[in-house]
């Protein structure tokens, strides 16, 4: 659910764009971060943790915790809370990271 008319901030979401999450079209607004747009569309799990393979999503929402990694337009490990949506953006969850999970990295 998008907050389209905030009681204090007013109407901020004015430029709709279409983004694609797992190839499904979702409505977003240019002023939103990828994380906010996904949450507004009901997406809460953005990936899994590297070592224990547990669900991960937005935690700090300010670029500090790295819990919200997604793949954006083919670029891996993008912090979704720090990236603004763009028309036609293709987003995939961070479900696999085999290089990090291999034995040589301590798993
Ligand atoms: S939610 Fe913490 S870096 Fe994005």
Image (cartoon, rainbow, N blue to C red):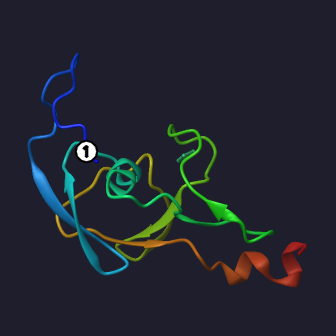
Above or below — where is 18 with respect to 61? below
Quarter of the rendering containing residue 10: top left
Q: Secondary structure at mark 1?
A: loop
Q: Is residue 9 left or right of residue 90?
A: left
Count neighbours of disc 1 (C-alpha within 10 A) and say few if under 14, some if 14 to 19, many if 20 or more: some
Q: Is residue 79 left or right of residue 19?
A: right
Residue sitting at x 42%, y 61%: 43
> What residue does disc 1 label?
2
Q: Position of residue 15 (x, y in %)?
A: 9, 47
Q: Position of residue 52 (x, y in %)?
A: 80, 69
Q: Is residue 96 left or right of residue 51?
A: left
In the image, farthest residue toward the top:
8
Q: Position of residue 88 (x, y in %)?
A: 19, 70
Above or below — where is 72 with respect to 86? below
**In front of the other: 14 or 101:** 14
Q: Position of residue 91 (x, y in %)?
A: 37, 70
Residue sitting at x 52%, y 63%: 46
């Amino acid at each position: 659910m998008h907050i389209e008319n905030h009681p204090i901030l007013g109407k901020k979401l004015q430029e709709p764009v279409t983004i694609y999450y797992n190839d499904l079209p979702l409505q977003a607004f240019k002023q939103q971060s990828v994380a906010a747009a996904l949450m507004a569309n009901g997406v809460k799990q953005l990936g899994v943790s590297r070592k224990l393979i547990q669900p991960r999503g937005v935690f700090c929402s300010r670029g500090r915790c790295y819990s919200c990694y997604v793949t954006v337009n083919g670029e891996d490990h993008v912090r979704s809370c720090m990236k603004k949506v763009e028309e036609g953006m293709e987003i995939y969850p961070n479900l696999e990271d085999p290089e990090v999970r291999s034995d040589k990295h301590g798993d």
